[in-house]
Amino acid sequence: MISLTYPHQYINRNTLQVETEELIGDRSVSFLYNNLRENAPAMFKALTSRRMSSLLGYFHYDLPGKRRRDGARLFKTLGADWRECVEPLGYFDSQRKVFERQIRYWEERPMIDAAKNVVSPADSRVIIGSFQQSSQVFIKNKFFEIRELLGIGCPWYPSFIGGEYAIFRLTPDKYHYNHVPVSGKVVDFYTVDGQYHSCNPTAQIAVASLYAKNRRVVTVIDTDVDGGSQIGLVAMVEIVALMIGDIVQRYSEKEYCDPQEINKGMFIRKGCPKSLFRPGSSTVVLLFEPFRISYEEDLVANSKRSDVSSRFTAGFASPLVETDVQVRSLIAKPQE
């Protein structure tokens, strides 16, 4: 279980300092995922359906009375920086516009131009791990096995047995475009249906039956092609959450120009925008084949620190420690 008796902390990658996460909407999410699920499971199921999730998003982000808001105040409340955005401050008169903002990532999120490196797909907090120690990953307070995560019947899951994984958790203040972590050819692209659950660390899901696990979009990339990152197959799993009605695929090779849907057979380039999460907060999981990548030393060192009060403790001898990372920053290199 996830303890509520101490704060959730993470490591700032730039300073190596331990910081405490301020949870947005913490009280309402705690009510929804604790009292409501325990006392009214039928209502809980209804409220976490796709239609109700979209309605919750509308009331929180789009209700007419909330549309004209002071942009500076909205950014200050979130702790986000409007100066890195493509649009001027006056454009941001609603919470949705702030949430779905575009940034000058080509200036504000520079990328080391090494073809075989793996970069972060999002501004997020990351946990790294290996399936050599466990056959499961712990996402949104639920355990997933590889086959469940990719979808029952997926032919690709044997490739990732014994491999590595990285879980990137986006909080409401983050820039919510996902970017391509590697270069390669899309060999599969599909959606796995499921319910909508918050990735707020206080959300507790006591029963993790398969039908209740979150809806997710899976992109399998073959990097062992001409121009690819040469690290084997990589699965990118984008997982929806409370108040997110959709994940919009918007792949663009230059800035945000001419966005395209992701399709099997297309070549996608590392660092380019891939998709946009609709309002809420959510998670991206990367899966790698065994013995193909090595995580950056600072991420490995952070994952072993014992001075962090993490709420991600269920079933583990020690807490799962997150590191705050920026999109397009270096995460891993090919294993030598």
Image (cartoon, grey):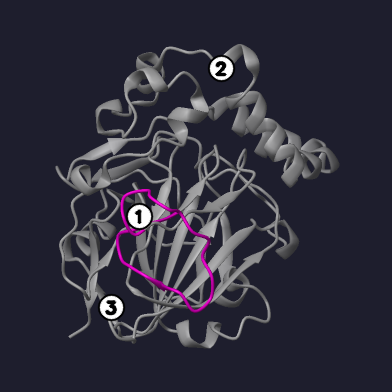
What residue do we see at 22% from left, 76% from top?
116
What residue do we see at 31% from left, 39% from top?
103
Distance CA(mark 3)–CA(mark 1): 21 Å
Q: Residue flagged by tag 2: what amino acid is it?
A: Arg
Q: Where does residue 295 sit, x and y in percent of width and height?
A: 25, 69
**121 or 294: which is nearer to us?**
121
Circle 2 SS class: loop
Residue 238 falls inside the magenta stretch = no
Q: Which residue is mark 2?
A: 67
> Based on the displayed image, in which of its 4 quarters is residue 269 positioned?
bottom left
Q: Which residue is mark 3?
A: 229
Front label number (2 vs 1):
2
Q: Residue flagged by tag 3: what amino acid is it?
A: Ser
N-terminal-most mark, 3 or 1: 1
Q: Is residue 312 visible?
A: yes
Residue 255 falls inside the magenta stretch = yes
The numbered mark at residue 95 is none
N-terminal-most mark, 2 or 3: 2
Q: Residue flagged by tag 1: what amino acid is it?
A: Val
Where 180 falls versus 8 (above or below)? below
Q: Where does residue 196 sit, x and y in percent of width and height?
A: 66, 48
Q: Which residue is mark 1?
A: 126
Residue segment shown in magenta: 253-274
Circle 3 SS class: loop
Distance CA(mark 2)–CA(mark 1): 33 Å
